[in-house]
Image: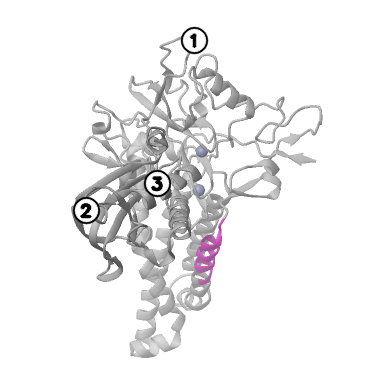
């Protein structure tokens, strides 16, 4: 019997035959669980017997209730599907391709404009990996490699994303852990004080119960971050926004130059808390336990699903252009927005972001150096200092182009000095200092730079290293120098001229004709 979870394409781990879903790396979660169990165990073993005798048996009972609550909440958060949206099926991708009038355009720059129930217009971004337009509040988690409904953040401590379907457990976990930390810490102190009264000195009391000091230290260290986080999430719940939205400042009106209020807020902190913590929970969008009939006559689509096993809940606009409202909010009866149907023929109002590709800013220098924390990690004398920015869509062609141009661009005069722009860095045996620079792809939202066009850290690091390796292969290993990827660097250059050239890898068509001459 084959169930649907066996075809899950994200990096999530599925266990219990599709009943539990968690992230792909749960090492830190296991450590957190271990720490909670050990500290609570020490408390039950070393403090509770004495406190029961001296004060009341209610102390361990209440601690046990808190402990069970913490464990239940963290396990529930870690193993609940946070609201993963299924990727598009082949049919749906085809439908989307057809709906676009112009051909030969990749979908990466697509944006769909929708109107919320409040009348606000919001742009939905297209997810390259999942091939869907992300409904409001949906974000793609790079660690899980999946789009998550009401994405809050990916929490390493629970080893899972926190989103629509497990946020309340996460919040309860923070709440109960805060109380447990304070509770254990307070009774550690009381224990020491009572024992001191019996033994006359603090040192004797501590020698009697050394575990108490360990517990008190661990609790004291963790109390601040746990309570801080709990307070922060209480604040977020009252405003009905997610951590992701708070960080990105999504509902800040200056982004769109119009009055943009959070359409998910009920305008009242109490109502917001109630709907976030007590509103009905939607079922998992994945239906991981659905049994798949394997029939060789029916072609499998990209998601590994038979075409006839369509979801009952859909995430793509139906004929009326309305999303299923369960994706983001199950407690409202009306969908929170409807599509603007500007053209009957073409319901998706598509805009394309102006595309920019791998960028290099080339500077002819007399000398250049890179400093990290006061240490000079690279320096060159005459040559090129190159800032490289990597865009979302860059591939091997862009690398080839940039490498070719860097080594052949003629920025120095001929030997006799009669002709400018005659010799390149290879002719002169000069050096190159390359520095990765994600800010090259910034766009402006008002006055605030936005870097969503830059490629994510790990991916761009791979491409950036390819550029370096290719430069070394095509030139000389000892002539290629490098900053420190992702670090704060101080770059010191002496621009010779000044000569500064900007290269965009996909403007190569116009350049190619120049090459042929
Ligand atoms: Zn996605
Ligand atoms: Zn995640």
Towards the viewer: 118 or 305? 305
Q: Residue at x 43, y 38 (%)?
A: 276
Secondary structure mostly seen in the magenta stretch: helix
Q: Is residue 260 magenta?
A: no
Residue 166 x %, y %: 51, 45
As drawn, the label of residue 133 is: none
Q: Which residue is mark 1?
A: 345
Name the quadrant containing residue 269: top left
Q: Is residue 58 left or right of residue 415?
A: right
Q: Residue at x 58, y 53 (%)?
A: 24
Q: Residue at x 38, y 27 (%)?
A: 123
Towards the viewer: 388 or 156? 388
Q: Which residue is mark 3?
A: 390
**Quadrant the C terminus occupies:** top left
Q: Nearer the viewer, mark 2 or mark 3?
A: 2
As drawn, the label of residue 417 is: 2
Circle 2: element type: loop
Q: Nearer the viewer, mark 1 or mark 2?
A: 2
């Amino acid at each position: 019997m084959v169930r649907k979870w066996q075809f899950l394409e994200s990096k999530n781990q599925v266990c219990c035959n599709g009943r539990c879903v968690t992230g792909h790396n749960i090492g830190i979660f296991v450590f957190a669980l271990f720490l909670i169990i050990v500290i609570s165990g020490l408390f039950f073993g070393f403090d509770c017997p004495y406190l029961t005798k001296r004060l009341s048996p209610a102390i361990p009972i209440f601690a046990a209730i808190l402990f069970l609550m913490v464990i239940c909440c963290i396990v529930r958060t870690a193993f609940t599907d946070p609201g993963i949206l299924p990727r598009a099926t082949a049919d749906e991708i085809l439908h989307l391709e057809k709906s676009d009038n112009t051909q030969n355009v990749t979908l990466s720059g697509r944006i769909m404009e929708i109107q919320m129930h409040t009348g606000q217009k919001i742009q939905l971004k297209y997810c390259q990996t999942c091939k869907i337009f992300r409904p409001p509040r949906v974000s793609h988690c790079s660690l899980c490699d999946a789009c998550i409904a009401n994405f809050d953040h990916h929490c390493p401590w629970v080893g899972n994303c926190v989103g629509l379907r497990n946020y309340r457990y996460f919040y309860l976990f923070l709440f109960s852990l805060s109380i447990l930390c304070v509770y254990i810490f307070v009774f550690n102190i009381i224990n020491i004080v009572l024992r001191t009264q019996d033994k006359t000195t603090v040192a004797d009391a501590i020698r009697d119960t050394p575990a108490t000091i360990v517990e008190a230290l661990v609790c004291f260290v963790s109390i601040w971050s746990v309570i801080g986080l709990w307070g922060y999430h209480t604040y977020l719940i009252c405003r009905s926004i997610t951590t992701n939205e708070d960080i990105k400042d999504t509902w800040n009106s200056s982004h769109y130059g119009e009055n943009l209020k959070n359409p998910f807020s009920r305008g009242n902190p109490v109502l917001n808390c109630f709907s976030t913590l007590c509103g009905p929970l939607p079922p998992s969008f994945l239906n991981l336990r659905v049994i798949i009939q394997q029939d060789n006559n029916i072609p499998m689509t990209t998601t590994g699903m038979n075409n006839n096993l369509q979801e009952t809940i859909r995430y793509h606009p139906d004929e009326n252009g309305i999303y299923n409202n369960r994706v983001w909010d199950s407690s409202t009866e009306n969908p929170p927005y409807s599509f603007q149907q500007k053209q009957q023929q073409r319901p998706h109002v598509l805009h394309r972001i102006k595309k920019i590709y791998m960028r290099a800013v080339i500077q002819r220098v007399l000398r250049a150096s890179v400093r990290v924390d006061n240490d000079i990690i690279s320096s060159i004398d005459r040559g090129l200092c190159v800032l490289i920015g990597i865009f979302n869509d860059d591939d091997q062609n862009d690398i080839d182009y940039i490498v070719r141009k860097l080594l052949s661009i003629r920025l120095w005069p001929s030997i006799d000095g009669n002709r400018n722009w005659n010799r390149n860095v290879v002719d002169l045996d000069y050096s190159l200092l390359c520095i990765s620079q994600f800010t090259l792809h910034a766009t402006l939202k008002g006055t605030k730079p936005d870097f969503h066009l830059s490629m994510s850290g790990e991916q761009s690091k791979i491409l950036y290293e390819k550029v370096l390796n290719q430069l070394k292969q095509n030139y000389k290993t000892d002539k290629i120098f490098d900053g420190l990827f992702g670090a704060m660097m101080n770059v010191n250059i002496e621009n010779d001229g000044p000569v500064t050239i900007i290269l965009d890898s996909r403007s190569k068509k116009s350049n190619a004709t120049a090459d042929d001459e």
